[in-house]
Amino acid sequence: DKLTLAHGLNQSTLFADSRACQKLKQDDNISVFPDRQVVAMTGDGTNDAPALKRADIGFAMGIAGTQIAKDAADIILLDDNFASIVTAAKWGRNVYASIQKFLQFQLTVNIAAVITALVGSFAFAKTPLAAIHMLWVNLIMDSLASLALASEPPTEELLKRDPVNRSKSIITSRMWANMLGHASYQIFVVLWLLFAGPEVFGFDPGHLVESNDGLYEGSKKENSEHYTFIFNTFVWMQLFNEINSRSLEGEFNVFKGIFKNPLFCSILIITACLQVIMVQYGDKAMHVVEGGLSAEYWGISIGFGAGSLPIQQVINVVYTWGDKLLCLHSMRKRMTKSRRLSTRNIDADLRDNASNISGSSSQK
């Protein structure tokens, strides 16, 4: 019965037998997770309640199902349509992917902002990103980005992905590559502007302009153009990286389906407009230079921000080649240690062939 089947699948240790799992994959195209299997059951009667309770996920019928079956189930199909299970799975995967997208974006901002603040404090005893700047970045990162990235509609491609193992980390290796790659790019740009910016662009160093210790002739404790430029560049890099964060599997076209999510586009445009208003008219309230930045500096800031798009393609190429080299190294290592590239042992095959040859020779 259903209860016996659910209990047997839950207690199965087939995943520990690599040869049996590989045979099932080759013969029947059945994939077995290297962990305990996730069991789903459907039912509508009272006698199905134990199986629904025993399964990891129990589906009960909302119309034809009994109250006992509904109480034992985890999900109730209100329309008694099995196609709703596919819809539920699609939306469930979409929620999981949305959380991953948000984490990928948030952790990238955290890494870049923390290192920028630390380096600036250690080098000049003053961080280039003021407290009000960090509050605005946090607002972009937490509130606006969560709304934008969590509102992505589900696609049919989600159903083509392999199910996520229960023991797998929510932050994948590709996500780590994206986060570290973009954080490295952002840190490099900000630190280059911090240390080499005054000499390259010809404005006074921000830590001297904003100081009031009498050691610098032009010090008036005013908001500097230097630090305003850094703040503006940093925010634009986050806005363009928010577009990159929509992709989790190394997709080439990061703009694919972006217009199907009007909320994402609206939040991105509103954030960009608010950034322009704050930098140009924020003055002391937003700790920016009076009168804002010139068109030249705006173009450079947006240019550095748009640089996140080709950087994403570089990360994709490097990760793909690195993954291939890692697989090749793992295969060579396996062959070096056990001389085995499949479930069959090469030494055993050689012995079998030798015995067959000797047997045929003796018969002759």
Image: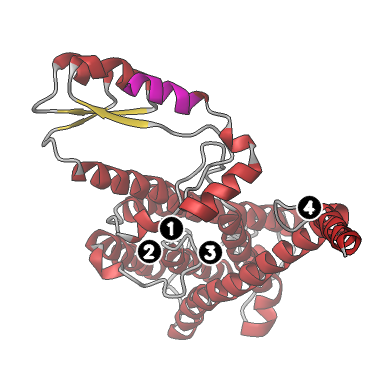
**In this rendering, which labeled residue sits more in front, label 4 or label 1?**
4
Q: CA distance from mark 3 to mark 1?
A: 10 Å
The residues colored magenta run 1-10
Considering only order in the chain, which callout, 1 or 2, is on the residue closer to the N terminus? 2
Q: What amino acid type should be assigned to the residue bearing mark 2?
A: Met
Structural distance between the alpha carbons of marks 4 and 1: 69 Å
- Marks 2/1: CA distance? 7 Å
Q: Residues within 10 Å of mark 1 (few under 14, many from 20)?
A: some
Question: Which one is nearer the viewer's eye here, 203 or 186?
Answer: 186
What distance separates the C-alpha of mark 3 from that of mark 2?
A: 13 Å
Residue designated by label 4: 345
* Residue assigned mark 2: 278
- State if disc 1 and disc 3 touch (CB < 8 Å): no
Residue 241 or residue 112, whichever sits in front? 241
Q: At label 3, which amino acid type do we have?
A: Asn
Which residue lies at the image location 46% right of the left edge and 51% below the top edge?
A: 28
Asked if residue 112 lies in the magenta stretch, the reply is: no
Task: Evaluate if marks 2 and 1 touch, with contact meaning CB atoms under 8 Å apart.
Answer: yes
Task: Identify which residue is drawn at 66% across, 84% down.
Answer: 200
